[in-house]
Image (spheres, rainbow, N blue to C red):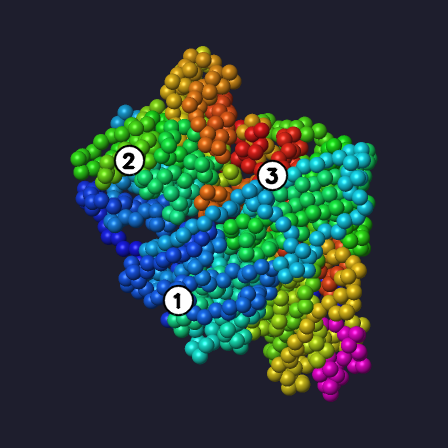
């Protein structure tokens, strides 16, 4: 029997949840129609800072159907201590507590919820609430906030961040360098804006028990958070996030709508739904604005002698959100002298948050623009420059990588792109009125692995169910679970059901950091292996001895059977084993964790994904309209479980990277202290017309050490560096270097 | 819920009667009005649904023009064979706007009457003289990179967001309206107005008046024309600057007539007849186009973040004139700029 008929790891299986999603059979948080449901509409603060002095509810309460209005004045009891509001990914500072008191910390802050029998009544009444404020001076201007930048001491209560490591004398090396470059780069603030708005439907079961259908990236984290913050007790709270319409990090931490919906439910002892409006999607976390000064020194040959980075990102006044900005360039390139500085600047907005490849998408991208500038200064081809400075080890920590096939990614990507056809001079390629530019950039992200449990249950009829509390935020976790199970037990995918997104299921961490596939996959594999062993043991007890004297290592599980690898005897159907053993079901639950060996490996080796992005742009020579006509992204990410969903992840990441390069930007009105373009009409992400050919290559990168399955994860690497490839291509096309993303028409006008 | 009365007349006279009161809104495609109601920007007490009125046809006019019913959808207009053949400038401008789904719902009358996309107008927690006269203009001194550079006032720097109307302005269309005082015809240039001291008024319709049709004159400029739109992404974004050019060349290759209308730069589609006259009798060429561009933009005022629009508009005018003269009109599918 040849293994090629086996559907499992490496098969381009279509999404197992695809049909349910496109037919509407997959329910999202706001779509659970529980009985006797009330609708809550949240009122947002008009001012950016100050306090509420009065709320006149009379007109709102007079609207027929209105049941109650909750605010700081009459909210139910909440936990008093900040530590009771910790979530799975808490950061230093004071977590935001909706309706906690009269203080206003940011524009759009939820200050009251109108609860009514219908959504329409609640929405109308919410518009009638008369709120009086006493405003205070505020600042949301990033430039102005830099005057207050700081970095709390490592290890203090307000800091869980590890600053970049320095080596050598970077400033001296920079001063003495034959070729040097110094420039400051900027990234505009971006809001996540997944398609599904944050929503919560809380089902009240009486006697203090609730089921919370919530949009988030980790059901068990939200369960623990609600249990603690509202004193409910974990056993009384079940959180379900079976389907999530995109997250990009906005669901890593509990968002305020789950607080509001839970509060209203507790207060009214009835089921309540709260859904954010699109405008309210701009009232929580966002990718922090960043300013990043890069200094590079090199020899005449282009060999780097000094890498210096000094970055500041924005946070709120109540929490310290810190990102790794300056580390990426130092990790990726070889330089004897490195030095990094990092600070955060507080302003009167909600706290910034992780957004797809936090830190790297900003830091690596901006650094890769600097590297491009340095290549031109050194008069070296930008790809060649990167190869000259290629680092076989982690350049910052000086540790080996478990694997790094970036060289292969550069080579395969360049070949596919025809990089060697590039004309080196800027503004030297043209067709009609369009200037053509080719740019390259490097991407880098973590390959992480998190302790995760999963269960497997094989029924007598051959149906297999695998389950884990992890989330599928659109990345394809359902499909990965089915594939790993199919691979391990040889059961056909259509005979397998994957369950996830439910706090009742085996323990899993929040889905983020691209660790989902590696971690959940490993746990599912362990659980299925245990089932396999139980089946083998049962087969051994069968009178007919169908597997003869074979040991467990001598058999394989394929096509719903156990069979000897030496092809001896007949394949034994799993259902036959179940029948003969009179099993109705075999169950197993296992936990995959790095273990001691893994922990040692993690300390001794760096684990990362890498990518090489090649981009062609066409820019109108006078009007500066930019078209990204071609991208090749060659990714080194270990073993690929599903080439189809993996490619989709990269396509999505690249598209978001194009948005970072050209479109995404939230505009702040500093006088009013609010974000102004809070709609999809004016907050631009790429439209179909902006996306042309995107080719994804996965280079071969066997890595038995990085995670149990050799999987590195793909959710984020696609965005990292993409915007730099676009920016570098625009420079090559036009000769104009724009150091502030997004590169809009006005910035190219010169 | 938001309470309003709702009428669904089947004849224009009934609609005018239903729409006679104050705080009345006519509902056609609803692509803008319903949004504005959701955002609490529009709060009509009486909604008159005009979708059953017999205004959904495109008809030949005596004398060679075409009458576009107010209720014909934008897409049905753009893809109508008569419009495509005789008024390709209009078809092109319509297809440069919105998305197919929106154009399938939005109507011609509604397109004229859509309101600005100014951030401050849409956000009721910010000041806006257009939404709330006397409150002040948030955009002046605020986030104004999409705002107007021509014909502004200290009360308002909003733009009219339509693409279609820019072409209609260039074509010298006429707007047919009906009201309690009878029917009247409004030249397109007089239909929309500048903000002045009354920015809450977008156009010159009298209260209760209803747009019934748009008349296109016989002169259709189907040979030398273009609609060129620059925006922040290649589709589904309002114009930063757009230009509709309708040109006629004489047998000698000289320009016999030319109209240039700009979108994205003013409270109405912007025309400058004196600038247009500079072209008459001239051979098409970069220098005269530059002179026209300078003349069109004369008096333009930037408000900070939109300063770039002045130079961008100059370049758009020059390129659009070139496209029209060369008979290489801008494609709305291939986003490459010819």
Which residue has dot 1 on it?
Answer: A74
Of the two numbered discs 1 and 3 on the same chain, state the one appearing first in sequence: 1
Q: Quadrant of residue B188?
A: top left
Residue placed at 46% from the left, 55% from the top? A104
Query: How would you rate the neighbour count of disc 2 (Cα within 10 Å): few for under 14, some for 14-19, many for 20 or more?
Result: many
Mark number, residue B213:
2
Query: How would you rate the neighbour count of disc 1 (Cα within 10 Å): few for under 14, some for 14-19, many for 20 or more?
Result: few
Badge 1: chain ID: A
C-alpha separation, residue under disc 1 versus residue under disc 2:
55 Å
Q: Is residue A547 magenta?
A: yes
Q: Percent from the top left, x then y, of residue A464?
A: 62, 73
Mark number, residue A740:
3
Query: How would you rate the neighbour count of disc 3 (Cα within 10 Å): few for under 14, some for 14-19, many for 20 or more?
Result: some
Q: Percent from the top left, x then y, of residue A691?
A: 57, 43
Q: Are marks 3 and 2 in contact (CB under 8 Å)?
A: no
Q: Percent from the top left, x then y, of residue A519?
A: 67, 65
What span is colored magenta in the figure? A536-557
Q: Nearer the viewer, mark 1 or mark 2?
A: 1
> Relative to A272, does residue A159 appear above or below in the rendering?
above
Q: Is residue B221 magenta?
A: no
Q: Secondary structure at mark 2?
A: strand
Residue placed at 59% from the left, 47% from the top? A148
């Amino acid at each position: 029997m040849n293994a090629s008929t086996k559907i499992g790891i490496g098969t381009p299986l279509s999404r197992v949840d695809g049909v349910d999603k496109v037919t509407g059979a997959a329910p999202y948080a706001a779509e659970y129609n529980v009985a006797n449901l009330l609708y809550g509409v949240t009122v947002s603060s008009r001012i950016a800072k100050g306090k509420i002095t009065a709320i006149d509810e009379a007109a709102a309460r007079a609207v027929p159907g209105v049941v109650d209005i909750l605010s700081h004045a009459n909210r139910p009891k909440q936990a008093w201590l900040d530590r009771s509001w910790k979530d799975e990914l808490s950061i230093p500072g004071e977590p935001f507590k909706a309706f906690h008191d009269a203080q206003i910390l940011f524009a759009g802050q939820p200050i009251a919820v109108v609860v009514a029998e219908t959504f329409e009544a609640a929405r109308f009444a919410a518009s009638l609430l008369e709120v009086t404020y006493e405003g205070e001076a505020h600042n949301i201007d990033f430039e102005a906030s830099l005057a207050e930048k700081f970095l709390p001491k490592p290890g203090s209560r307000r800091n869980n961040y590890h600053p970049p490591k320095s080596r050598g004398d970077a400033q001296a090396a920079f001063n003495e360098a034959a070729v040097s470059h110094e420039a400051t780069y900027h990234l505009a603030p971006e809001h996540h804006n997944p398609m599904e708005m944050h929503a919560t439907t809380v089902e009240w079961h009486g006697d203090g028990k609730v089921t919370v259908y919530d949009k988030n990236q980790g059901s068990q984290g939200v369960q623990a958070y609600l249990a603690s913050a509202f004193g409910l007790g974990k056993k009384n709270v079940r959180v379900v996030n079976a389907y999530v319409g995109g997250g990009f990090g906005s669901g890593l931490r509990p968002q305020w709508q789950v607080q509001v919906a839970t509060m209203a439910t507790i207060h009214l002892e009835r089921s309540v739904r709260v859904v954010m409006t699109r405008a309210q999607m701009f009232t929580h976390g966002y990718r922090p604005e960043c300013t990043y000064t890069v200094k590079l020194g090199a020899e005449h040959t282009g060999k780097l002698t000094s890498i210096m980075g000094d970055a500041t990102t924005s946070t709120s006044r109540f929490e310290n959100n810190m990102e790794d900005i300056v580390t990426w360039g130092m990790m990726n390139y070889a330089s004897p002298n490195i030095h990094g500085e990092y600070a955060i600047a507080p302003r009167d907005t909600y706290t910034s948050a992780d957004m797809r490849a936090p830190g790297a998408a900003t830091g690596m991208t901006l650094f890769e623009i600097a590297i491009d500038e340095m290549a031109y200064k050194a008069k070296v081809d930008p790809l060649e420059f990167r190869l000259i400075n290629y680092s076989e080890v982690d350049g910052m920590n000086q540790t080996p990588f478990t694997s790094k096939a970036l060289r292969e990614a550069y080579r395969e990507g360049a070949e596919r792109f025809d990089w060697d056809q590039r004309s080196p001079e800027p503004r030297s390629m043209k067709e009609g009125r369009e200037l053509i530019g080719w740019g390259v950039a490097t991407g880098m992200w973590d390959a992480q692995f998190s302790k995760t449990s999963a269960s497997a249950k094989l029924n007598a009829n051959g149906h297999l169910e695998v389950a884990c509390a992890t989330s599928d935020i659109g990345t394809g976790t359902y499909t990965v679970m089915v594939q790993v199970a199919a691979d391990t037990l040889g059961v056909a995918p259509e005979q397998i059901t994957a369950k996830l997104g439910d706090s009742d299921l085996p323990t899993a961490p929040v889905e983020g950091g691209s660790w989902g596939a590696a971690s959940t996959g490993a746990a599912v594999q362990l659980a299925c292996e245990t089932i396999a062993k139980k089946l083998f043991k049962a087969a051994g007890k069968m009178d007919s001895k169908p597997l003869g004297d074979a040991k467990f290592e001598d058999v394989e599980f394929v096509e719903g059977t156990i069979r000897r690898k030496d092809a001896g005897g007949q394949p034994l159907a799993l259902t036959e084993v179940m029948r003969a053993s009179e099993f109705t079901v075999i169950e197993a639950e296992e936990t995959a964790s790095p273990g001691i060996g893994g922990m040692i490996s993690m300390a001794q080796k760096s684990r990362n994904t890498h990518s090489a992005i090649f981009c062609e742009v066409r820019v109108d020579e006078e009007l500066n309209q930019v078209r990204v006509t071609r991208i090749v992204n060659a990714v080194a990410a270990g073993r690929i479980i599903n080439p189809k969903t993996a490619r989709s992840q990269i396509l999505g990441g690249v598209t978001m990277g194009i948005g970072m390069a050209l479109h995404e930007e939230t505009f702040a009105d500093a006088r009013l202290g609010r974000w102004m373009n809070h709609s999809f009409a004016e907050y631009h992400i790429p439209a179909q017309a902006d996306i042309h050919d995107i080719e994804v290559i996965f280079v071969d990168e066997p890595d038995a050490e990085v995670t149990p399955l050799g999987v590195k994860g793909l959710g984020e690497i696609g965005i990292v560096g993409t915007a730099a490839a676009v920016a570098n291509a625009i420079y090559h096309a036009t000769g104009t270097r724009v150091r502030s993303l997004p590169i809009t028409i006005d910035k190219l006008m010169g | 819920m938001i309470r309003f009365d709702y009428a669904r007349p089947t004849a224009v006279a009934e609609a005018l009667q239903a729409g006679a009161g104050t705080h009345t809104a006519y509902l056609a495609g609803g692509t803008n009005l319903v949004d504005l109601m959701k955002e609490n920007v529009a709060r009509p007490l009486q909604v008159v649904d005009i979708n059953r009125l017999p205004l959904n046809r495109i008809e030949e006019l005596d004398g060679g023009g075409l009458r576009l019913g107010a209720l014909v959808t934008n897409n049905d207009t753009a893809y109508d064979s008569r419009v495509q053949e005789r008024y390709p400038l209009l078809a092109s401008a319509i297809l440069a706007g919105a998305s197919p789904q929106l154009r399938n719902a939005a109507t011609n009358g509604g397109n004229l009457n859509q309101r600005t996309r100014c951030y401050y107008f849409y956000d009721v927690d910010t000041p806006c003289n257009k939404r709330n006269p006397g409150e002040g203009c948030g955009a002046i001194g605020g986030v104004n990179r999409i705002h107007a550079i021509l014909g502004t006032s200290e009360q308002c720097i909003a733009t009219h967001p339509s693409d279609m109307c820019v072409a209609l302005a260039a074509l010298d269309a006429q707007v047919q309206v009906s009201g309690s005082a009878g029917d009247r015809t409004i030249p397109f240039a007089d239909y929309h107005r500048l903000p002045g001291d009354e920015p809450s008024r977008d156009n010159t319709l009298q209260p209760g008046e209803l747009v019934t049709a748009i008349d296109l004159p016989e002169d259709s400029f189907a040979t030398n024309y273009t609609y060129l739109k620059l925006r922040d992404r290649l589709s589904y974004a309002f114009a930063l600057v757009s230009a509709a050019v309708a040109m006629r060349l004489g047998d000698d290759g000289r320009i016999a007539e030319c109209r240039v209308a700009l979108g994205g730069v003013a409270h109405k589609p912007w025309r400058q007849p004196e600038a247009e006259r500079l072209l008459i009798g001239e051979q098409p060429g970069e220098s005269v186009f530059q002179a026209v561009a300078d003349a069109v933009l004369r008096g333009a005022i930037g408000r900070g973040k939109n300063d770039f629009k002045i130079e961008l508009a100059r370049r758009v005018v020059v390129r659009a004139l070139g496209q029209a003269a060369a008979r290489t009109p801008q494609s709305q599918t291939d986003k490459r700029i010819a």
